[in-house]
Amino acid sequence: MRILIIHLLFCTFPIFSFGQHGIIPAPSEIQERTGQIFFEDKQITIQAGVLESETIEFLKSEFKIIGLELSETKDADIVFIPLSNLPPEAYNLDIDEKITLTASSASGKFYGLMTLLQWIGERKHVIYAQKVRMVDAPAFEWRGLHLDVSRHFFTIDEVKRFIDLMVLYKFNTFHWHLTDDQGWRVEIDKYPRLTSVGAFRDSTVIGHYSDSPRKYEQQKYGGFYTKDQIKEVVAYAKARSVDIVPEIEMPGHSRAALAAYPELSCTGEKQGVPGLWGVFDDIYCSKESSIKFMQDVLDEVLELFPYKYIHIGGDEAPKARWDECSECAKVMVNNGLHDTHELQSYFIGRMDDYLTKKGRILIGWDEILEGGLSPNAAVMSWRGEQGGIEAAKQGHQVVMSPTSYCYFDYYQSSHHSEPLAIGGFLPLEKVYEYSPIPSELSAEEAKFVLGGQANVWTEYIPTFDHVEYMVYPRALALIQSLWCEKKSEYETFLADFILFHEDFLESHNVNFSPSIHFPELHVERSDDGVNIFWTTVNKQEEFSLRTSLDGSFELTETKNLKNGESVTLNKSSFAMPLNFELQSTELDEPLNYTFFPSEILGAQIDLVTPANKKFNHNGSLNLVDGILGDGERWKGDEWLGFREEKIELIIELDAIEQLKTISLGFLKSNGSWIYTPKSIQVSISPDNKEWQEVTNVMCPGETDAIYRPEIELNSYGKYVKITVYPLNEIPKGKGGAGSIPWTFIDEIQLKMQ
């Protein structure tokens, strides 16, 4: 195996730096010794009576995967030494004549064994372990993975497998998203209709939310977990040092519950469980009977889940029904509340008080900060880091889970082979960049950050194989930030993954994404246009590129390219689309690209309004790289994203030119809070000082998924200023109502006389 080769390379170095040993997450300290111990009979024994029987059964299955039969005995290969002054999840691993694990808790022992599983190697059918001493402890106490089982339901066995895989890499918190608009998944004895009605929907949307017209699969879909099944999973997780945080959504994302008990809403209107994704106006009413109902539900949830944190959601709760509800108005008057944001704070506060009296801690998405946060509540920051920063400064516990780094339902590559996703772009390297401690926090404030978590929302993830594809290997990149005090450079991590962990995941039959091996397209400015080139992690890879330069799809020219070797597209080729077909050894089918060069291909653009760092791939070049954004499978590498009240950019030409028309593209995906603008203003200048407004175009309210207006200019100038005016706020009744919408802009094309 490759693990042996790497060990032999490093055997002359007694101490080496982070990441060079292949273990993920990397141990805090590691020192190799001379020699190995061998398991020639393919047997390994562990000290009897130390670990729970279910933990032992799990370990037997894991050691079997690497070729060893595990059994318990008194005189064992693996022995444990208790040491009370070690942190709860810390361990020391010594491999000499025996394997000694020092720890103060069952978790510490378990994590030491997870490291040992990665350390043991094989050569010529001989299984061995290099002698070593490791000292290790996690940087953060909350190392979470989330799974949404409402949008798509996963069986108990699949949930167990999700837990089995996460513990191999020392994740310790499973956030189980059990209720939402599209399905209620937990049995509640007092309210049986929650599962008999709320657990099933009659249809499910096919394709993307933004498709027009939408199509549906007209088939009953759903399922739920019995209390016995949930208790079984909780015990299963405990044996693997995992705590489970259940999420019971309130007051929003509650249509499944309202389908079962419509009297809990403001209108009392009877509606079914929706088969469409998104945000719905109908939420739990703030009246006392609805609050009492949810507290009854929490009573039964607390009996099932012993961990101290209980997640109550709190996100994306439109106030349209509350604004018109006489019952809500009474609650506001009786409690001196000024608006419905304070009313939501009141609702969450009631739940917080209730859970606190039960000895539990409420945690919710960062919207629970709006209107004032209950003193005992913890915050999970998802809309960027600002909510977490604000909560930590107020002295609240925080779990960081920003969309820009931790949403594993986003695309992880730009390749056409990627399955349909909600949108966004989160490749492995970007996940690896993340640090849970924002720079805005002082050392004292940073102590309130418990850790971080990746979220797996399953609107577009219908099968468990697909779940694995979206989670791995990105989970390995995230755990480095959550476990390691100091992590290696990305290149070292990537080498470790390729050399060690692809085999490790394959041995566990994980359907992980191979996207890092696919050719990645790069675009750079050149003197007269752009250079395009492809790279892969295999530096020796060569590509076969077929092209058509006549605007047709007949590919007539073939060129062999080395990894990173570029092809130049000049502005002079602006009159026709350029078609490319790329083939490499890593691809089952070739990749096809079409470029649409224009007379400003590669031009310099001043982003007076900077793009949001979440959607800022390649900066201003993204607007003049010849690539048109996709409206069906939009990814963050095709569009620049802005979330401002005004967007301004300036194009610089080589000289004063007679300008005929200008066009630019906008994405419409309202379910993702992305809206086309109100208006577009264009001004012209000879010197970037004196400006003349040429036109101000009002945009239609209803557009296709991509709105690409062509605007008449008929003016002379060297500089072109485009000012985009987005909607002031997302309309009532829509997801994110009241917030500034996202504006996504792609290719700008300028025609000259």
Image (spheres, rainbow, N blue to C red):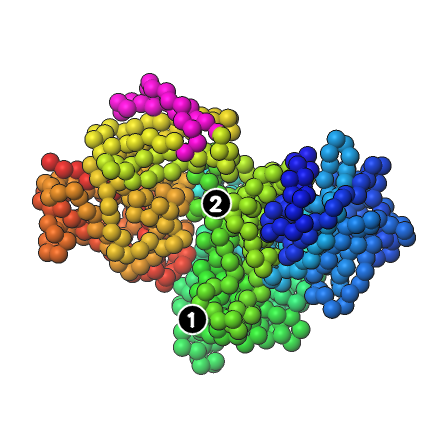
The residue drawn where x is 10% and y is 56% is 690
Residue 500, percent across and down? 63, 40
The residue drawn where x is 61% and y is 38% is 499
The N terminus, quarter of image: top right
Which residue is under mark 2?
427
Q: Can see residue 678?
A: no
Q: Can see residue 144?
A: yes
* Side of 579 where 119 appears, left or right: right
Tell me the tag on residue 340.
1
Mark 2 and 1 residues: CB-CB less than 8 Å, in contact? no
In the rendered view, tell whether residue 244 sits above or below residue 640: below
The residue drawn where x is 40% and y is 26% is 561
Whether residue 544 is in magenta: the answer is yes
Amino acid type at image mark 1: Thr
Tell me the tag on residue 735.
none
Residue 34, percent across and down? 74, 46
Separation of residues labelled 2 and 1 (CA atoms)? 38 Å
* Side of 500 where 64 appears, left or right: right
The residue drawn where x is 60% and y is 51% is 17
Tally of marks: 2
In the rendered view, tell whether residue 570 sits above or below residue 221: above
Amino acid type at image mark 2: Pro
Estimate how packed mark 2 is, as few (under 14), some (14 to 19) or many (20 or more) residues with alpha carbons within 10 Å. many
Residue 257 location, quadrant? bottom right
Which SS class for mark 2?
A: loop
For the residue pair 370 and 719, the one nearer the viewer reads as 719
* Residue situated furthest right in the rendering: 74
Which SS class for mark 1?
A: helix
Residue range (magenta): 541-564
Residue 298, percent across and down? 63, 66
Whether residue 567 is in magenta: the answer is no
